[in-house]
Image (cartoon, coloured by chain):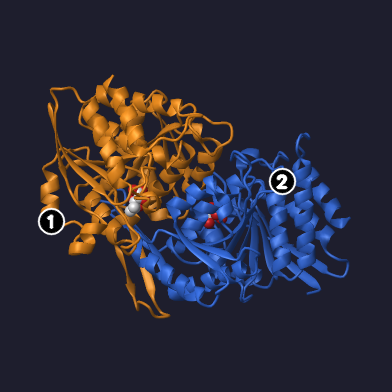
Chain colours: A orange, B blue
Amino acid sequence: SRSINLAVIPGDGIGQEVVAEGLKVLSAVLPQDVKLETQEYDFGAKRYHATGETLTDADLDSLKRHDAILLGAIGDPSVPSGVLERGFLLKLRFAFDHHVNLRPSKLLPGVATPLAGAPEIDFVVVREGTEGPYTGNGGTIRKGTEHEVATEVSVNTAFGVERVVRDAFARAQARPRKKLTLVHKNNVLTFAGHLWTNIFNKVAEEFPEVTTDYIHVDAATIYLVTDPGRFDVIVTDNLFGDIITDLAAAVSGGIGVAASGNINPSREFPSMFEPVHGSAPDIAGQGKADPTATVLSVALLLRHLGHDAEAARVEEAVTADLTDRQGKPARSTSEIGDALAVRVAG
Amino acid sequence: SRSINLAVIPGDGIGQEVVAEGLKVLSAVLPQDVKLETQEYDFGAKRYHATGETLTDADLDSLKRHDAILLGAIGDPSVPSGVLERGFLLKLRFAFDHHVNLRPSKLLPGVATPLAGAPEIDFVVVREGTEGPYTGNGGTIRKGTEHEVATEVSVNTAFGVERVVRDAFARAQARPRKKLTLVHKNNVLTFAGHLWTNIFNKVAEEFPEVTTDYIHVDAATIYLVTDPGRFDVIVTDNLFGDIITDLAAAVSGGIGVAASGNINPSREFPSMFEPVHGSAPDIAGQGKADPTATVLSVALLLRHLGHDAEAARVEEAVTADLTDRQGKPARSTSEIGDALAVRVAG
Ligand SMILES: CC(C)[C@H](C(=O)O)[C@@H](O)C(=O)O
Ligand SMILES: CC(C)[C@H](C(=O)O)[C@@H](O)C(=O)O
């Protein structure tokens, strides 16, 4: 489309800084005839403290009108754990039915990894985004007493599992290696595990070219550090996806470069793109944050909106920038953003 | 005590081979005046196929009479996923109230790690063993249809959380660094998360010398590969503990050396000691399995039964053996067991 109407949510801490650079690169890469309109929203700790609000129905109505959302990071130690996570981030993912949480991991040449021998890493995790243990189902009785019982209910539906599994198969089919791994814990969580496994096996029949395998989540963490090259596309539930994508980010260049998209493939609601990292209040406002993860999230955003050539240009710019870093002095957040903007423009 | 009445469960695959070496080392390390009696049980895939049984009430009655249990590994591809895990292993852990699942991680000098720079690693995970998402609560409706819903209920009680948290504090207190980290996901799983966090903070008051911190499980996987030295003792729930201890094993020498104890500190029921690895049917019967994890589990067993000096001798033997391995040809399962038996005896 020839215009992008973007909702921008800088959020807390380094969110402000990295989003500014993401927008800088986005403006630089877009052709002249694509009109970029942005509207900034003030969600996060400051608004919560001022008004008690995290995300209202009116906010959702307003956000709904955008083509996509760019999010920095939400979270601050001054807000009790869970308030902004459940009240803003998860509320938005659920309200806009972001059931495909896409998290690519690619270790670029020259980029530091904690793993010895710099293995080849190039896979994508398709994390379910609207079910599992993230539904908020559960509760507490006898709170604060010695008889307290707290439950968390993981809810898994055939509808919800099938659509994300099918999405993952389609992504695997489109990649050269055409391999899809289901990660779950079906030997212990047998109710949810059987649902996931049966649907995975059923949908596999529609994709005869895709090689499949299954790995328990605990074993998956072993492979992620001993043999990450074995993965091409991974599909998994919301909580397992949360855990293994942080590990995946750590081994493939760190959370400074890990991008994500919260995608609604039906386009009924706008999709949201955000770095995997948090608001990092300890380094906020110092120009120390690496905006690369946000810039790569902008690439996912561009691809989602059909600007494939521009998405590729952003990814190439990041690859070149990361490869060039070795042995050079550290740059500030905006210096990295400037360098990327120059690269994508030229 | 001057006698040990041990239940031995070799189980499936390499379980048979590694348990034989564990017993070899146990016999070699015990002083002459400690009488070792063993009784072997045939649980596992073979018995399941022959009788349909995994673990009967009569079995539990019989196992109950032992001082401790040594387990190899249970599991075979011929048995549907979940049958032996839920029907044997978890049934036993729950029946004998093994609420402290102890999993030490120590990277010994010279031992291979996938991490660059061979960082210092020496921590213990105290994994809750009788609650959380492992209870088997939950269910399925409309199974096999497009309207299937499957739930898994994580059950967390003040009673269950407090006893394992207190155990972890006591272990941290007894270690030189005196540091305890709670790993959970209290920003998303807020019901269970608040219970864990509140009890952790309350029990902390009884242990003023112990330094505490809190890390989300996703972030914990990052630290386990980028800064594992930051951990001393970790306490966490059943599922998070399952996941992070496989990762911990991977970074600290591999699952070939990862030991565990399923402990009932009240001694109302016998505790069970087992390697973290599985039955590895692909290499079973070939003498390729490393019995070190089982031998280190024997050390945990000895310490649990009050034979501290013997436990230390086993650990020293393993340290020496691992340090000596570099550049030498691979040895068979029984050759490693023999070498360890010689070391502990001498
Ligand atoms: C902040 C938190 C709610 C979130 C999650 O658990 O999904 C984050 O860890 C992520 O992975 O995006
Ligand atoms: C085999 C399986 C049931 C078990 C678990 O999940 O606890 C194993 O992974 C472990 O860690 O001991």
Q: How many marks?
A: 2
Query: What's the amino acid at mark 2?
Result: Pro
Percent x, y of residue A245: 41, 43
Query: Looking at the image, is A20 positioned above or below residue B198?
Result: above
> Cβ of disc 2 within 8 Å of ligand 2?
no
Would you identify the image quadrant in which residue B323 lies?
top right
Q: Chain of mark 1?
A: A
Which quadrant does the C terminus of chain B fall into? bottom right
Circle 1 Cα neighbour tier, 10 Å, few/some/many (<14 / 14–19 / ≥20): few
**Residue drawn at 60 percent across, 49 percent down:** B249
Q: Secondary structure at mark 1?
A: helix
Q: Which mark is residue A57?
A: 1
Which quadrant does the N terminus of chain B fall into? bottom right
Instruction: Give left or right: position of B207 versus A11.
Output: right
Percent x, y of residue A216: 48, 46
Query: What's the amino acid at mark 1?
Result: Asp
Query: Looking at the image, is A293 positioned above or below residue B44?
Result: above
Percent x, y of residue A192: 37, 52
Q: Chain of mark 2?
A: B
Regarding residue A34, the answer to whether it shows in the image is: yes
Percent x, y of residue A48: 22, 61
Residue that label 2 marks? B109
**What is the distance, in whole Å, between disc 2 and disc 1 at their CAs?**
58 Å
Circle 2 Cα neighbour tier, 10 Å, few/some/many (<14 / 14–19 / ≥20): some
Query: Looking at the image, is B253 positioned above or below residue B177?
Result: above
**Residue drawn at 62 percent across, 63 percent down:** B177
Q: Secondary structure at mark 2?
A: loop
**Residue drawn at 48 percent across, 63 percent down:** B213
